[in-house]
Amino acid sequence: MSSCISSAAVSGSAVYSGKQQRRAPSVALAGQMPHHARAVLLSTRPKGSQVSLSSNFVAGRPHARRTACKAKVSMAGDGLKRIIISGAPASGKGTQCEKIKEKFGLAHISAGDLLRAEVAAGTEAGKRAEGFMKAGELVPDEVVITMVKNRLAEDDAQTKGWLLDGYPRSASQAAALKEAGIEPDIFLLLEVPDDILIERVVGRRMDPETGKIYHVKYFPPPPEIEDRLTQRSDDNEEAAKNRLATHARNVNAVVDNYKHIMVTVDGNRDKEAVFSDIIEAL
Ligand code: AP5
């Protein structure tokens, strides 16, 4: 572990503005952590910089923050990374997961993808979930919790580590993870303003062959694959507004469970800049 880690244990969140890429102070976030977690803010503090050690949320949305720091997480004794990535609809979770998975070879477990697979297969769970998903509401716990727990128990997640995307989304889902003894090492929260999110949702296109995510304006697909691209049934403005409202209602309750290992990342930047901050944190 780095020699710059302080022994001070604090409870709070590490924050990236991304726009300020200066060196930040050395503070350990070791208090109240799961046994395998060690989150630390790294390196030397620039003049005039601040570090936020509290999560300042108002009306379900995090405050914009001027603070910048670098964080580092060293993982469990088995060396496997266990990551939760959270954020509003279209904040870029899936886009960043593609890159994190490619770099670290983790099992990417997306609650939304699992549910869409159930819907496509016409299972009972899928039939139950479909209406909620179209409306932008949370699918009931009895469908989601077991589904995610079972997926986390599969071999690849156990042997490679995992990247959990879009779960938990409520206090009860977070409690279910805890009860099952499933603890992440780091909780990444992507922050993007709502108006940008709506534009991202309606412009998103998926490649069913590669699973790659495009955007008509921000990441236009190569012309030769345009015809095969699909659009999600919940990627319209009305459902997106509901999804944002659902997220806003629940985000505080989820964050409360992970403040001690939370790293907030400004997701309203080029995806490579966002990824670079995430890599710094991992
Ligand atoms: P889910 O599939 O998880 O949807 P979501 O949370 O709404 O998130 P998205 O997949 O829409 O967005 P994303 O953050 O992955 O963004 P992306 O990278 O694609 O869930 C769908 C539904 O399933 C829920 O509404 C709910 O009904 C149900 N559900 C899921 N989990 C559940 C749970 N735990 N409990 C109960 N129900 C659950 O990017 C979006 C677009 O932006 C793309 O076009 C991309 O190219 C673009 N983009 C990405 N990054 C950038 C960037 N940096 N700059 C510009 N554009 C960018």
Image: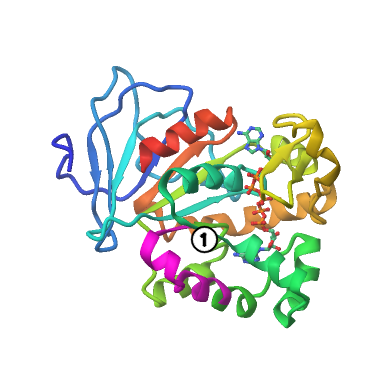
Q: Element type at marker 1?
A: helix
Question: For residue 153: magenta?
Answer: yes
Residue lying at 63% horizontally and 58% vertically, measured from the top left: 249
Give the class, few, some or many, for how many residues have Cα within 10 Å of label 1's Cα (few <14, many ≥20): some
**Three-letter residue code for mark 1:** Ala
Residue labelled with disc 1: 253
Residue range highlighted in magenta: 147-163
In the rendered image, residue 22, in percent from the top left (x then y), is placed at 35, 21
Residue lying at 53% horizontally and 34% vertically, measured from the top left: 64
Which image quarter is the N terminus in?
Answer: top left
Above or below 221: residue 31: below
Would you say 199 lies left or right of 275 here?
right
Which image quarter is the C terminus in?
Answer: top left
In the rendered image, residue 190, in percent from the top left (x then y), is placed at 54, 42
Task: Residue at the far top: name it.
Answer: 47
Residue lying at 52% horizontally and 46% vertically, measured from the top left: 57
Prevailing secondary structure of the magenta residues: helix
Question: Residue 280's quadrant in the figure?
Answer: top left
In the rendered image, residue 247, in percent from the top left (x then y), is placed at 64, 55
Above or below 119: residue 10: above
In the rendered image, residue 94, in percent from the top left (x then y), is placed at 60, 48
Would you say 236 lies left or right of 5 here?
right
Task: Residue at the far front: name it.
Answer: 224
Name the one closer to the observer, 150 or 135: 150
Question: For residue 226: magenta?
Answer: no
Question: Residue 212's quadrant in the figure?
Answer: top right
